[in-house]
Image: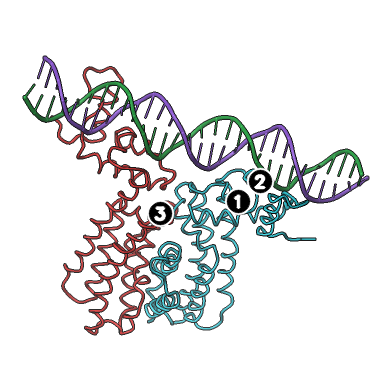
Chain colours: A cyan, B red, C green, D purple
Amino acid sequence: MIVILSNEYFIIVRQAKNKNTATTKTFCRRKEARPSEIMKAALEEFSLNGFAATKLNDVAKRAGICKGTIYLYFKSKEELFEEVIKDRLLPNLEKMEYIGELSRGSAKDILREQLSTIYVALLSTDARHIPKLIIGEGSRFPELTEFYYKEIISRLYNIINTVIKQGVEAGEFRQSALNWKTQVIMSPVLSAVIWKTVFDEYAPMDLDAYLETHIELLLHGLEK
Amino acid sequence: MIVILSNEYFIIVRQAKNKNTATTKTFCRRKEARPSEIMKAALEEFSLNGFAATKLNDVAKRAGICKGTIYLYFKSKEELFEEVIKDRLLPNLEKMEYIGELSRGSAKDILREQLSTIYVALLSTDARHIPKLIIGEGSRFPELTEFYYKEIISRLYNIINTVIKQGVEAGEFRQSALNWKTQVIMSPVLSAVIWKTVFDEYAPMDLDAYLETHIELLLHGLEK
DNA sequence: TTGATTACTGACCCGTGAGTCAGTATTGTA
DNA sequence: TACAATACTGACTCACGGGTCAGTAATCAA
């Protein structure tokens, strides 16, 4: 008995039927697994085409189901889009908040570790497409944009601000760093994500060198 | 005789006709002015809605004409989009390349002036919406993305690299700055543009403080 | 094995918007 | 004033895709 049926297997089964092979199922009931499979497929399609140009038919095909099934789990295309975005944000956020508590050592060391963890977390999963989607479709989903700002960006900034404050208090960093805009300090992260998802095939990014520059520039800039 | 007829005036004239006012024109022939008016209207609509969700009917209304007229000057919606983007890039590019030749003084001073000029040039015109459009629609317009990278980004990077090199040779900046990724150095610019066009209404940006942080962080980081 | 439940299908509806084109109004010319 | 040339209009077509729903097939309980 097959417990978890992968999309790939499912597609093969359905093709077999077309060839008049004996008793095969036209579909499986998998109520629990559908929503996450649909969201995964949807994120892939949205990443490729943006919101408006994505066809729910293509999302369905990618998820190994037919279009109608999507509407058993999501009210509309808009709702699916919002769910997809929000769903990918939470695990990443938790990962980031976790970082600050892990490290012991100088503010310099903590900051260094935090930055590299953020880069890896953000660039190595398919969550890297989300900033692009927020930027491109944000004006049509104002509520989502606000959510993204409040729940992700500002929390991330808080983490960084805390460490910088610690560094200043401990005499490691310059006093004036307290007035610096966290946006500026963190902007290379946004920039890297954009680069990876937009320009990377024309001008590939050397992530290690990039990260090294960011850390060196920031830490040297912070020094007393 | 009216030489240059503004869109607003034109709309008033057409409304007047509906009220059965005597001899008014239903339209004017303005072959020369149409393309740039259409592109202006199109950029506004594309900025608000993105490519796919923009209706050419709305673009036409905004330009004070009807939809068919757009097709007298542009082959398709795609072509209009590409023209709009490319058209806005050239004047800005020239402005940027001009900066390097203006300043005399230390590398530090030139860099400071270049950065603030770039910020103003990029944030104060409607060209600020273009990065958002490239990011959001880039995957559907690969040729345009490549154009943008080659003709704008890499040229801008060259300008900055040249100054940094000068600074290192003059002994103003650290040697290791030569290996730094220009992407990192310039990322606050991209970040600021994104912020202004996406998040500004939820968390307004203090441009002066932002610029100050960027300059201070960069220059202090570059110091020997 | 049968019947009830329901996850899923896929053909269909219908609003929408890109693109067309025959006709109309304007402008320049004689 | 009349004519020719053409910029412009606006009603039209048609493909496309979001959303629906009656019917079908899988699953489970008895």
Residue A183: x %, y % from top left: 41, 65
The label on residue A69 is: 2
Q: Residue type at mark 1?
A: Lys
The label on residue B200 is: 3
The label on residue A61 is: 1
Q: Is residue A58 left or right of residue D1?
A: right
Chain under disc 3 = B
Residue found 51% across the figure and 69% down from its top? A159
Which badge, 1 or 2, comes first in the chain's sequence?
A: 1
Q: Is residue B123 left or right of residue A42?
A: left
Q: Residue type at mark 2?
A: Thr
Residue A146: x %, y % from top left: 49, 53
Q: Are tags 3 and 1 found on a single chain?
A: no
Circle 1 sits in a helix, a strand or a loop, which is it? helix
C-beta proximity under 8 Å, tags 2 and 3: no
Q: In the depicted view, which residue is nearer to us: A131 or B27?
A: B27
The label on residue A221 is: none
